[in-house]
Amino acid sequence: MLAPLAAVLLFLAAIVASFGYLRLEEIDREQEAVKRDVEYTQQRLRLRLLERQEQLMRLARDIANRDIDAEDFQSRAEALLNQYPDLERLSWLDERRRIKASYASASLQPSLRQLLGETIKLSDIQDIYSLARELQQPVYSQRPASTRSAAFLQLHIPMMDRTRFVGVVLAEYSVDGLYRYGVPAEVSARYAVSLLDDKGARLAGTSVPPRNPATRLFPWADPINEYEVPVSPVGNGLILRAQAYRTSLGVIGSGLFWLVGVLSFMTAWMLIANWRHNRRRQQAQQALVAETNFRRAMENSMLTGMRAMDMHGRITYVNAAFCQMTGWSEAELVGATAPFPYWPDGDHAQLRQMLNEELGGKTTPGGLQMRVKRPDNSLLEARLYVSPLIDSRGIQTGWMTAMTDITEPNRIREQLSSSFERFTTVLEALDASISVAPLGSGEILFANKLYRLWFGGLTSGHLNLVAQAGVPAIGPSDDARDQVDSFAGLPTSALSDAEPESAEVYLNELGLWLEVRTRYLNWVDGRLAQMVIATDITARRRAEQQAAAQADRAQTASRLITMGEMASSVAHELNQPLTAINNYCNGMVSRIQSKQINEQDLLGALEKTAHQAQRAGQIIQRIRSFVKRSEPNRTWTRPDDMIAEAVELVDIELRRRNVRLSHQVSDSLPLLLVDPILIEQVLINLLKNAAESIDAAQRPTAARRVELRVAQNRVGDSGGVEFSVQDSGNGLKPEAIERLYEAFYSTKTDGMGIGLNLCRSIVESHQGRMRAENIYNGAEASGCVFSFWLPVEEAATIGAGQAATPHKTPG
């Protein structure tokens, strides 16, 4: 029964409400339009002022740098005022507020120009002048209008000569000029635009006359549509305001039409809508209950403890995590006041002071750290973050506290601190200099004690080590910033994993040999840095030099020992050509005395005598070059030449021991970059040891043989020439193979133990490899093979069949 009446009343109320709603919406749209246009105008004025300010700041810098004088200032000020009509005057004031130069616009009245050009009241600019001097940045001020002049906007730009204040450049803008040239024409056509000071007084522009309130039926529905905003960078000293001339009501008619239709439809469906509304309300209530349960479950599942207090410091709420951290139940905490149960007994005074500061609003953004006592008197470290508790009406009803357990992080932090101290102690105690410096900077990020002892705290030592080590490093003032090193373009993660580079350098200022190792790493602040580790190797270099000298003397001694052992055989070999020479000479003397020789027979006998003398000289020359001590001299040498020289020298020893030598040399062997004397020494030593092994085994004549094989072979990815010497002796015992190359170890009763050691050193000095293995006939050793491999250099592209200078033994 009440439904029709309620529908009519609702219809009338809806008409009135809809009218007001549409009107307010229209006012909002107009207000939004005014706001948008005012902000656009404000941006135009701001850009205009900033453009002038930038040019004036350049002028001030030139004055501070003494690039212009008063006359130049006059000319530049005249150019600026001619270019910008809103600028009325430019003045140069020194540090004592004295006018050194000034120029006024020609558009001013003569009396006003004289007033501006000759007089500036210090009381008007003293405060702003001091403010610009203190802030050291441009400051705007408002010069109010007077009976003799219009309002002006002043800009004080301080001039600094490095850190010394030398005065200001004072620029005066015409507020009316700013309005005429800064406000867009399309904006001034739609609105009454005016510029106001901080007290609301109009300085320039127009305004809409106030309306009579008596003529407005609903003042709330027809307000004055205006908007104002401060002009940046001036601030509140200059305000831009715009007022709309009129508003439109055209949208209301169409709105009422559609509103009547909608309300008619609503009247017919009133009961259905009411039923649906009740249904939706029930659904909303159920959703609200579910949301509340979900939020409560979420609060109980949080690992962060939550605590709420009222304005008097009484606990009003705690979540499950807070109870779990402290060990106290919700019933024991809710309603409690200070001192709270979880406060340690010895911290009451400190915690009460913290609570008073918290209730007073003095919260720390980084949180507060405190100790928390559990019911079993155990303690934990916690950090509390406090924030105001604001209700839905925006009123503060208390304080909300979030608590996290930081016991474990504090323990880890202490361990890291102790670890850092131990790490630093170890680095300081190292006998190597360690320094870290960032690329492109002149600072030292880290330097240990030895670095400071050698180089002090300067970066020059680090850069000097890097430069001598041959690693590219870019200092703060290097001209080589455009140089590209081998790591250019790699990400810093790849640089930190790069292999370290090592070099040995000599520092004259320290008189030390240093082994310098460098590598790139990512410093803790993300910068790419270079670490240099320098170790003193002076003693090692001296030992290496002494060892090299000892090795050289040992090699010479080995050759002398070898030739000493072969002395009798050499004497026997020399006896044959000398005996032949003697016989030839005696025969020629006898036949000459008996006059039984002709010229042809005499010439043949002399040629045979010369051949035998040449043969004896060659033997002596070869022995001299072998035992002569000289520095290693690597030359491109044919393997055939070295084999021929070694075989000819050792052939005497082999024949003395009744040992037969057979050698197999491959064709087209490449040239080798070696010291031929040293390689011949290795071959002679191996062949001589093979003959001695056969002699010691007492093999029969048919089995007394030594085989020399030379062939091109590969070891891994490298090509080379392999020399192998195989004998038919008793072989080597297993324990002898393990100690074969030890110094002064020998399997012979009269051996010195330096021959094979020297052979291995010679082969390895040529980047070669040497090995020994037994040859077995069943379970019994029937001989031994010594072999060594020499690499073929890449430069040795000349084949054995091409022309090359063979090695000749020096005389």
Image (tube, rainbow, N blue to C red):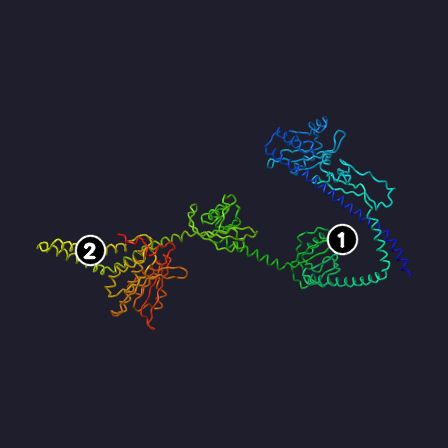
- The quadrant in which the N terminus is found is bottom right
Q: Earlier in the sequence, mark 1 or mark 2?
A: 1
Residue at the spot 55% in from the left edge and 52% down from the top edge? 523
Estimate the x, y position of residue 609 in percent, counting from the top left.
17, 55
Estimate the x, y position of residue 774 in percent, counting from the top left.
34, 68
Query: Disc 2 marks which amino acid?
Result: His
Estimate the x, y position of residue 238 in percent, counting from the top left.
73, 38
Q: Which residue is mark 2?
A: 611
Query: Disc 1 marks which amino acid?
Result: Gln
Relative depth, front residue between 732 and 326: 732
Q: Which residue is mark 1?
A: 396
Residue at the spot 74% in from the left edge and 30% down from the top edge? 149
Label 1, residues with CA under 10 Å away: few <14, some 14-19, many ≥20: few
Label 2, residues with CA under 10 Å away: few <14, some 14-19, many ≥20: some
| Real-space CA distance between mark 1 and mark 2, rounded to the nearest whole angstrom | 125 Å
- In this rendering, the answer to whether 243 lies above or below 322 is above
Give the secondary structure at mark 1. Answer: strand
Residue at the spot 68% in from the left edge and 40% down from the top edge? 47
- In this rendering, the answer to whether 405 lies above or below 208 is below
656 sits left or right of 146 in the view = left
Q: Quadrant of residue 347?
A: bottom right
- In this rendering, the answer to whether 50 lies above or below 267 is above
Give the secondary structure at mark 2. Answer: helix
